[in-house]
Amino acid sequence: MGGSNSLAPSSYGYAVGGMFVFNLIVGIGALAMPYGFQSAGLISGVGMLALIGLLAFICVTYVIEILSHANAVNRLEEKTIDSYSINDDDEKMTLVTNTDDIDGEYEGFDTFEEEKSIFEITEKVEMGTMSEVFMGQIGQKIFYGILIIYLYGDLAIYAASVPDSLAETLNGGCGFTIGSLVLDQDVMYYIWLVVFTIFVTPFCYFEFQNTKYLQMVTIVCRYVAFALMIVIAFIYIFKGEGRAFKDTPWFNYKGIPVLFGTTIYSFMCHHSIPGMITPIKSKRKLTLLMGAVYVVIFVFYVGLCVSALFAFQELDSLYTLNFVGYKINLIGLYLGLFPVFTLTTNYPLICITLRNNLMHLITYGDESKYAKYRKIIFSTAAAFPGILIAFITKDVNLLVSYTGSYAGLGIMLLIPPILVYFSRKRISQVLPNTKNPYKSPFQHVAYIYVIIIAACISLILTTLNNGVSIACFFDDEQWSFCTPSNSTNLLDCSDSSSHS
């Protein structure tokens, strides 16, 4: 997943909307994907990308349809209120939030155009709200619970990536020496993590500010970094300095679970789709737009991962670290520190989003009396767990894999199909035989069942694989299925790069 969507203006066309969605999806997950390709093999990687990309696209079309259903429900509630001519504000609010008031078929359309526009997407309705509208408060709490877990995983990934990049990039990943005091790379990782914590966490206690220009700079930095990585990788390949064709990993089923979680994390953006597509001026070709964006992202991911696989003998779990020793020092430094620039600015934004979701999920008593203390408590609860996880492990690929395999899978492959099932059921009751221009092309209920079953099977297999990994971690000699782990630390202090 990419960064914040705070850069998005009030309204825009298809081209700008597609760019924002692309930027929203492509982020830190892309930097972990080449290692996933190396673990699972080229054939497995391309196949997994195609499969997960297709499922992600189908679920995006579901989110668009659900959003149109939510807008229709809101309009029907407004018509219901008008028909009752209620003047009391409290009673009016009760009608707005209670969808039971529009049970039964609605027959109040005056013209065909009014019937056609009932599904028009003009109001941004967040996924949490739509979960409550169509699945009740239990559905809403389930969604927010999964989203909160996902955001904690996001913050842990950010907190581990920044100090790891600093420790690897500065001084060639060989630690730091002051006189007789030698600080190795692991010690430097923890020192940089403390520095990161001191510098970033205070911003988690504030509110969102106008960060338009800062976000614009990070977007440009991201595109420049990805372009440099692909170009340099192809230069290595054309010069014959990369991996030999015979050494190319083609298929390894043991690496598929790692790639699975990373791929889901890299395609997951569904909780932010309502905020991205609502400002688009003309929405009749939204499905075509999203399909084009996902095709472009698929091609981009394949280009990034295939070039990485053939350019380097071994890949780091964070791909940018493979370029630390590049012969043009400025470019190596830029790519090595690229995650530091982008993730440091995004950490407070994700933290504030997490805090607001926690405050929405956990309520008690008269909140206005303790508003100041609630903000401090929940800001702390949002800011530090991710950093604590980063103190436990700096394996970015592991964090991305777990976050994608569980919370990412829930948001991308479970919530949308379940939610579209209940929203269709609701709409069929109140607006039967009404044409929805935003309905998903994947209307048959079989698509829903297949996606949910596939997600559940993947969840079970991933959990079993993680159990095997944990067993091997504690005692790899007892179990016959354990294989020796390979180090992904590519830097040698005597020769800091595999390419000169």
Image (cartoon, rainbow, N blue to C red):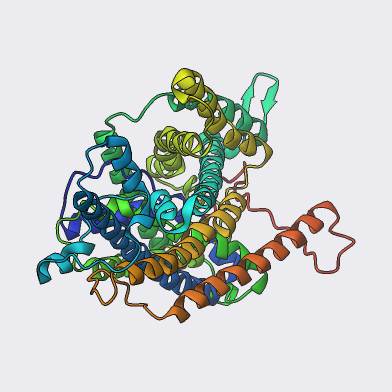
Which residue is nearer to you in this view: 129 or 484? Answer: 129
Q: Residue at x 68, y 26 (%)?
A: 182
Where does the image place residue 1, in percent across and percent down from the top left?
Answer: 43, 52
- Which quadrant holds residue 209? top left
Does the rendering let one see residue 404?
A: yes
Where does the image place residue 13, in percent across and percent down from the top left?
Answer: 15, 56
Where does the image place residue 197, in percent across and percent down from the top left?
Answer: 54, 27
Which residue is nearer to you in this view: 215 or 362? Answer: 362
Along the horizontal axis of the image, is 110 left or right of 425?
left
Along the horizontal axis of the image, is 392 left or right of 366?
right
- Which quadrant holds residue 270? bottom left
Q: Residue at x 83, y 52 (%)?
A: 474
* Total numbered badges shown on the rendered structure: 0
Which residue is farthest right?
A: 478
Looking at the image, residue 134 lies above or below residue 220: below
Q: Residue at x 52, y 35 (%)?
A: 166
Looking at the image, residue 253 lies above or below residue 162: below
Which residue is nearer to you in this view: 90 or 352? Answer: 90
Looking at the image, residue 376 lies above or below residue 400: above
Does the rendering let one see residue 239?
A: no
- Which quadrant holds residue 457? bottom right
Q: Residue at x 20, y 63 (%)?
A: 118
Where does the image place residue 84, in percent across and percent down from the top left?
Answer: 23, 50
